[in-house]
């Protein structure tokens, strides 16, 4: 989990947000784009997007891809339980008392603002709602990782 220097750093300035290093970019607001690109490249019938949905009054959303005992996000591949435990630990360091409900998402909402808003508490940007289209950037980022384990 990355914590931007200020809440406005990533969200209010599209140029600064776009110029973040890839790892930070996909940790701070574009994780859903990375999840979509990953599924476009590697999807199997067992892979699903999972939203770590913060409890009311907290921030710190994150979307990962899970399958079997594995997970993928900007870190790369991890054991699912390890990645989720890591995320919870880091979030609680930033926001004492933080908690979240892991929520499976339909794949088709990852790059649709309209469809994402149909799920309470979710509002995802589309790839072209960033300074530049974020999907090609996500596809290039995936080149850093080999094929998914356990598939």
Image (cartoon, rainbow, N blue to C red):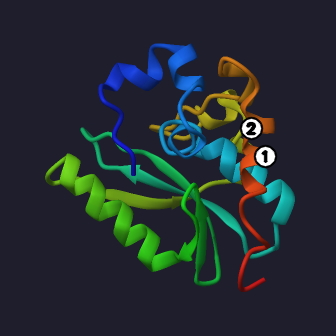
Q: Residue furthest left?
A: 96
- Measured in 3D between alpha carbons, the distance from the residue under mark 1 to the one under mark 2, in whole angstroms, is 5 Å
In the image, residue 65 lies at what x, y percent?
63, 63
In the image, residue 26 lies at what x, y percent?
57, 43
Q: Quadrant of residue 8?
A: top left
Q: Quadrant of residue 131?
A: top right
Q: Is residue 35 left or right of residue 75?
A: right
Say which of 70 and 110 sits in front: 70
- Say which element carries label 1: helix
- Name the residue: 71% across, 81% down: 149
In the image, residue 109 lies at what x, y percent?
70, 42
Q: Is residue 93 left or right of residue 134?
A: left
Disc 1 packing (10 Å; few <14; some 14–19; many ≥20): few
Disc 2 packing (10 Å; few <14; some 14–19; many ≥20): some
Label 1 with label 2: CB-CB less than 8 Å = yes
Q: Is residue 106 above or below residue 28?
A: below
In the image, residue 9 lies at what x, y percent?
39, 22
Say which of 82 and 50 sits in front: 82
Q: Which residue is mark 1?
A: 140
- Name the residue: 62% across, 28% down: 125
Q: Which residue is mark 2?
A: 137
- Name the residue: 56% across, 16% down: 14
Q: Is residue 65 above or below residue 141?
A: below
């Amino acid at each position: 989990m990355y914590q931007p220097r200020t809440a406005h750093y990533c969200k209010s300035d599209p140029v600064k947000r776009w110029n973040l290093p890839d790892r930070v970019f996909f940790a701070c607001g574009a994780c859903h784009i990375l999840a979509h690109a990953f599924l476009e490249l590697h999807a199997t019938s067992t892979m699903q997007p999972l939203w770590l949905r913060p409890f009311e009054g907290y921030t710190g959303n994150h979307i990962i891809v899970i399958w079997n005992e594995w997970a993928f996000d900007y870190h790369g591949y991890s054991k699912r339980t390890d990645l989720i435990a890591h995320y919870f630990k880091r979030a609680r360091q930033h926001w004492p008392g933080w908690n979240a409900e892991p929520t499976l998402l339909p794949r088709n909402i990852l790059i649709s603002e309209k469809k994402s808003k149909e799920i309470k508490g979710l509002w995802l940007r589309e790839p072209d709602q960033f300074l530049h289209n974020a999907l090609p950037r996500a596809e290039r980022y995936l080149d850093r990782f080999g094929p998914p384990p356990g598939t």
